[in-house]
């Protein structure tokens, strides 16, 4: 079995040649010092760390896994040392403000780091994966006293953090959460209740763990507006232990390197973060960034699966490939068989387009934060609001289903553990569920965002994409046609919804896929503008995936829009 | 977690109301005595046995699994007792000839039994799953002496059997196999080599195990024509042990209840079965039956996944469903949310159509064996040759991908072991690989069968389907249109292939899916003719899946044929 190796040259290509990111970033005063050399250097260092330190721990993470005993969780071999090295090298704080102990670098570098980490070791990466959200949450909502105690520790990753949202009967619907917070005379709150599916709720990676917990004050109304946010650490600043207990960890399909904890809060002394009743909003301040991270997990895992399948297909021979004459040996390489070629090139089309969309989104997140131009800000907000749920859904979907296609390249060998490909498929499956299920992403996109303004912001996004299509590219005509179809379909859903309230919910998945395919198409037309067709490997590296996209992937667009139109017509619109 | 419960009423409905099977079978002299009551009784008994004895062992099969130690394999708790009860009750011999110790019942009853067994416990079912093929192979190719020693033991299942085909470097391409068979002066052969992925190569279920092994005689030509078939038991008739060793069992993604063995043959004294150089043909005599069994595994596993998801969706509440007024409680049932309804109804559409196609194929297998009418025989041969690879591919695909959709219904709970749904997804994955990968099924269909006679047999099959569409059904018009499109696409591929030899291999998957959708459509139109629309549950039970098929599944047909036509056009055809 071959471990994942970061290919930072491909990532660098997208960053510089496709997105022209360094120039865009340097235009912002916050990143005036961030020159292309610095970015390249950070990326190279990150790749080295991931490849040498994190990737080799992946197999033990799966096979030995996190172990629970008597309320304590022991992480798999090597995880703790790797994490200590990780935070001490400053990686968690890459994009945190320098005033909080961070390095103040662009979000896109953090995005690339997390893509590589997830590809190398999804289980290990879950631990620091939540840090950034917790950091932003504390930074923007906590009192100065809390910040003094926790902000730097969380920003640097010296302490890890959790998000305690889900309860046994409240998953997608957090409004059903029952955990209680009772005010105490000293201004603290006694939090009681059980939270489930808490990634990294307990572990031995760091000296302390900071829990952010959604709970309900005694006088709170039912539903999501009754939820407030509380902070309770494993150990208080005075060194005493809180009444927060890890009762067990889940047995899961995969991701065994990440302990999924049942956490019991037993009148745990907690501090409120932000205002009462504003808990959900405070927790979701970083929702776009968190969903981008999950999309990057999908992209990374799919790349890891592709790497394994590609290596196998270049080594193993079975049967004669069609259209080939007698070649050396008794059989041809698996990678020369059309059905396998199709699988491999198709996954590569998804990975490369995924990078373009994810890195661009990371750039837009920095524009939101740092741009002084109101119009640019608004466009960035729109991009992130509309593109993020699409990416979260399709790239986690592709990591699992396309990962399964990569497994198929191995035949029977793919089903046994030896090659590590089946672990990727098992690990990847969870990303379709957490951080909002993929069905909820689709509803978020269509119902909460597109329909909320009658399709205006979606049309504005499509304007951006259409304007950005390279004039010369032959495929642009069909790309323009798909954009027009998407506009028409959007209008038709908006018109049909009053006749059939359930319709948008029925076709939300199709709509999200249709948007994804338009984005994929755009991304690849942009990639092609950056490719130097004279380089020796331009054909296999770039043109083959581009062709695969057009032959095998984009035709789904017609099917999706047909399904939607059929539903709208039935509703009389 | 709720264990799978056979729903024999649904199966009986397809058998009698949709396929009118009892009358068809009774028209054959071999089954003159097999009246509807007898069939119903056998089915009910089978359902009882599967539900009470086999289903409860599924979880331990996964969690404890088969264990290897020092060359011996211990099966999971309860597996041996269940197997002993199974063969002693006559279940393996259901469709075997009475002269060989069997019960001489129709193949369709065996098919229904294996669907239920696979749904209940895929791992356990692997053990008897290979018996029928071994029985037919020995019956048709072995010498009288071998038959006297092995036929009845294998027919009744008192001894289990294996098929030893794959080697470390020869999987899909068995022609690369290197295992040697050296003739001995006494007329036996010394077989040496290593076979991998041998399901049930070693276990403690039965007193003896009969191995059928592909190997190469010293003077054999390279490639598939140099392979001969040999029989070597674990214990010879005199009680001595053969030189066949289980060196280890694989660690797999799932199917832990079935030991996947590495078998080493160390000059093992063997008998030849059939003629030298005819090994592959003898082994594949039962290929259609074996692939039908794998298709039934897919149908069964998808039904099991659906049952779990359906039960969960009828119990758990999350959020308000659109278009519903205030209802009892704080939230609506998951099953009332359109995205979940779509998943559930769609899987049901696949399961029910799968039954129609699989049971019909089983009926055709009996016509091949027992019909005296040459035309009926030829039509049955055609049906089995064309429909079997389609079923094997699409129902194993759906068990995994649709099973994953069912997992999604559980949200985070689907990813943990507790509910048993993730086990189904892991177990189901292998069926896309074994008995010919799904890509090989597609090539078998398009290249070896459809193109071999320029599309004639496919057109004849389409004639049969077209003639069998109910005139009154509204959807028949679009069904007829799809059949016409499929004819045109077939002709176009035949025309394009000489210009581009790789083209059929590139579009084989699309072609197979297009054929599958035409078959699904036909199956559901047949189902609807059998439904009594006045029964209270006709709407949720039958009309909702039919609607789901037309809304969400059939639109894929256009996409598939578009992809094929695009390729043909590029090739100039």
Image: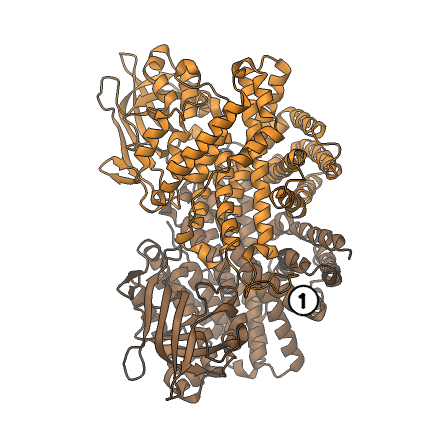
Chain colours: A orange, B brown
| Nearer to the camera, B261 or A187 | B261
Q: Chain of mark 1?
A: B
- Measured as percent of width and height from the top left, residue A226 is found at 42, 21
Q: Residue furthest right?
A: B572
- Measured as percent of width and height from the top left, residue B317 is found at 45, 38
- Measured as percent of width and height from the top left, residue A411 is found at 49, 58
- For the question of whether residue B540 can be seen, the reply is no
Above-or-below relation of A133 to A248: above
Name the residue located 43 percent from the left edge and 15 percent from the top edge.
A98
User: Element under label 1?
Assistant: helix
| Nearer to the camera, B389 or A498 | B389
- For the question of whether residue A464 can be seen, the reply is yes
**The quadrant where residue B15 appears:** bottom right
Q: Is residue B386 left or right of residue A203?
A: right
How many badges with numbers are in the image? 1
Name the residue located 73 percent from the left edge and 51 percent from the top edge.
B566
Q: Write down the residue under mark 1.
A: B450
| Nearer to the camera, A223 or B113 | B113
- Measured as percent of width and height from the top left, residue A490 is found at 68, 33
**The quadrant where residue B522 appears:** bottom right
């Amino acid at each position: 079995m071959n471990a994942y190796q970061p290919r930072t040259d491909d990532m660098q290509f997208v960053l510089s040649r496709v997105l022209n990111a360094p120039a865009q970033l340097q235009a912002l005063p916050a990143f005036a010092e961030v020159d292309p050399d610095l970015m390249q250097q950070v990326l190279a260092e990150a790749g080295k760390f991931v490849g040498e330190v994190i990737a080799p721990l992946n197999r033990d993470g799966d096979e030995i896994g996190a172990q629970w005993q008597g309320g304590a969780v022991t992480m798999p071999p090597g995880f703790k040392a790797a994490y200590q090295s990780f935070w001490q090298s400053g990686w968690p704080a890459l994009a945190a403000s320098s005033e909080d102990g961070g390095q103040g670098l662009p979000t896109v570098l953090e995005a690339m780091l997390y893509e590589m980490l997830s590809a190398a070791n999804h289980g290990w990466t879950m631990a620091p994966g939540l840090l950034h959200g917790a950091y932003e949450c504390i930074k923007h909502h906590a009192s100065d006293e809390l910040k003094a105690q926790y902000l730097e520790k969380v920003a640097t990753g010296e302490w890890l953090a959790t998000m305690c949202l889900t309860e046994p009967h409240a998953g997608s619907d957090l409004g059903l959460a029952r955990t209680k917070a009772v005010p105490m005379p000293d201004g603290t709150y006694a939090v009681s209740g059980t939270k489930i599916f808490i990634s990294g709720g307990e572990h031995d990676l760091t000296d302390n763990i900071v829990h952010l917990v959604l709970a309900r004050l005694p006088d709170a109304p039912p539903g999501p507006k009754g939820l407030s946010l509380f902070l309770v650490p494993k150990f208080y600043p005075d060194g005493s232990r809180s009444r927060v207990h890890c009762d067990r960890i889940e047995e899961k399909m995969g991701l065994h390197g990440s302990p999924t904890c049942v956490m019991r809060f037993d009148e745990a002394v907690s501090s409120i973060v932000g205002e009462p009743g504003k808990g959900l909003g405070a927790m979701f301040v970083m929702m776009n960034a968190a969903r981008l991270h999950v999309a990057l997990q999908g992209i990374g895992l799919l790349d890891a699966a592709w790497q394994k399948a590609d290596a196998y297909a270049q080594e193993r021979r079975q049967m004669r490939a069609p259209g080939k004459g007698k070649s050396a040996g008794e059989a041809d390489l698996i990678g020369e068989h059309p059905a396998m070629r199709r699988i491999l090139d198709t996954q590569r089309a998804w990975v490369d387009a995924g990078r373009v969309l994810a890195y661009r989104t990371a750039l837009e997140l920095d524009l939101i934060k740092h741009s002084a131009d109101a119009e640019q800000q608004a466009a960035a907000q729109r991009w992130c609001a509309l593109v993020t749920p699409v990416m979260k859904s399709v790239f986690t979907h592709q990591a699992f289903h396309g990962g399964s296609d990569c497994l198929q390249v191995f035949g029977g060998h793919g089903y046994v553990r030896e090659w590590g490909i089946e672990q990727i498929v098992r690990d990847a499956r969870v990303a379709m569920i957490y951080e909002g299920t993929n069905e909820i992403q689709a509803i978020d996109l269509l119902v909460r965002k597109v329909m909320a303004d009658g399709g205006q912001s979606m049309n504005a996004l499509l304007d951006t994409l259409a304007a950005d299509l390279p004039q010369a590219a032959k495929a642009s005509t069909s790309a323009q046609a798909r954009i027009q179809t998407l506009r028409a379909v959007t209008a038709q859903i908006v018109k049909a919804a009053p006749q059939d309230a359930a319709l948008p919910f029925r076709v939300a998945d199709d709509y999200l896929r249709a948007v994804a395919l338009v984005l994929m198409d755009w991304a690849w037309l942009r990639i092609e503008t950056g490719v130097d067709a004279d380089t020796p490997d331009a054909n296999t590296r770039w043109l083959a995936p581009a062709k695969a996209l057009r032959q095998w992937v984009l035709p789904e667009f017609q099917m999706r829009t047909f399904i939607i139109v059929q539903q709208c017509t039935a509703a009389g619109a």
